[in-house]
Amino acid sequence: MNKNFIYINTNKTLSLSTTGTNCFLNCIHCQKFYLKHMQSIEIFGNNNIENEKLINKLLNNYTSFLISGGLNENFEIPIYKYEKEIKFLKENNKLLNFHIGFLKEKNFFILNYADAISIDIIGSSIAIKNIYGIDKKPTDYINLLDQILKYKGDNKLNFKIVPHITIGLDYGKDSGEKEVIQILKNYKNIDKIVFNILKKTESVNFDFDINLNYIKEILICARENLKEKILFIGCMRPSGIKRKEIDNFSFHIGFDGIVNPSFKYKEYFKLFNNCCSLF
């Protein structure tokens, strides 16, 4: 048994939305469902008597926060509007993972507060169009990655940059995952990659079929081509029997960690109680 395997438990991470329950894209696989379950970041900017008890409770219960939300009309997650709230969390020694969308360079200043930045990388223009309904290309995602790497280097910042790949994003079909794997293989300054897997979202009418053999094919491709990188299975993946198969398969082919794994013997693994991007 691999004693270095990371059991990632997210119970100490709280997701904060910078847009409430609003999202300009309203993508067909999500339809704002996950935003409904996030705490608004605005509460940390209203430190009055009424909010004080809840703020103290959140600060005591969580060691890290995922700063996220929906996308605006510029395809950004507008985290830059909440510098005051983000600064407050950092002053209270909290770890912060940012989702950013297509953050504009003029707003990169907000990244100075990040401990980690999670960036989706999609390798298929068809998948982007079918699921997100926008005319972005895979090169747009890579260009954003390069811009953030440059900003980090130029400003001597220490945040982690963690690409995320979603297997089967395009209705469970090939979504350019292998192409992304080959691109990221050449990034020496990226040491960790997270793989999510398309899943059914509660109460969302989005029909798809994702084949377990295809999932395994991509995971094998990743492990064989990204030998020098830390590979995690992220929190988004199917439930039930398929989840157990994915988790066990990932462990046995040499993935380095899984978020909230379905293994029976979790106590034998190294525990990390925060969002996987922060590891």
Image: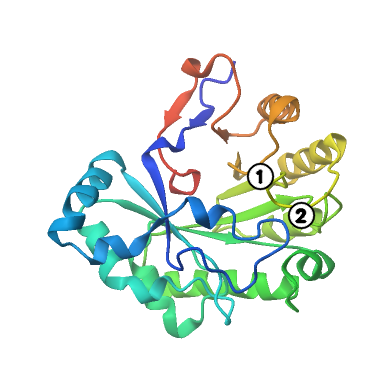
**What separation in Å lies between label 2 and label 1 (alpha carbons)?**
17 Å
Q: Nearer the viewer, residue 89 or 38?
A: 38
In the rendered image of this protein, does residue 1 appear above or below residue 278?
Answer: above
Q: Do labels 2 and 1 touch, CB within 8 Å?
A: no
Q: Mark 1: few, some, or many residues within 10 Å (few <14, many ≥20)?
A: few
Which quadrant does the N terminus fall into? Answer: top right
| x 49%, y 21%: residue | 269
| x 41%, y 40%: residue | 274
- State the residue lying farthest toward the left: 49
Query: Residue at label 2?
Result: 169
| Position in image of residue 227 (x %, y %) | 67, 42
Residue 261 showing in the rendered view: yes
The amino acid on which the numbered mark 1 sits, given as a three-letter code, is: Glu
* Secondary structure type for disc 1: loop
The amino acid on which the numbered mark 2 sits, given as a three-letter code, is: Leu
| Position in image of residue 167 (x %, y %) | 75, 49
| x 54%, y 14%: residue | 265
Q: In the rendered image, which quarter is residue 130 located in?
A: bottom right
Label at residue 70: none
- State the residue lying farthest toward the bottom: 106
In the image, taking residue 46 as reference, residue 260 lies left or right, namely: right
Query: Residue at label 1?
Result: 202
Q: Nearer the viewer, residue 18 or 121?
A: 18
In the rendered image of this protein, does residue 25 appear above or below residue 121?
Answer: below
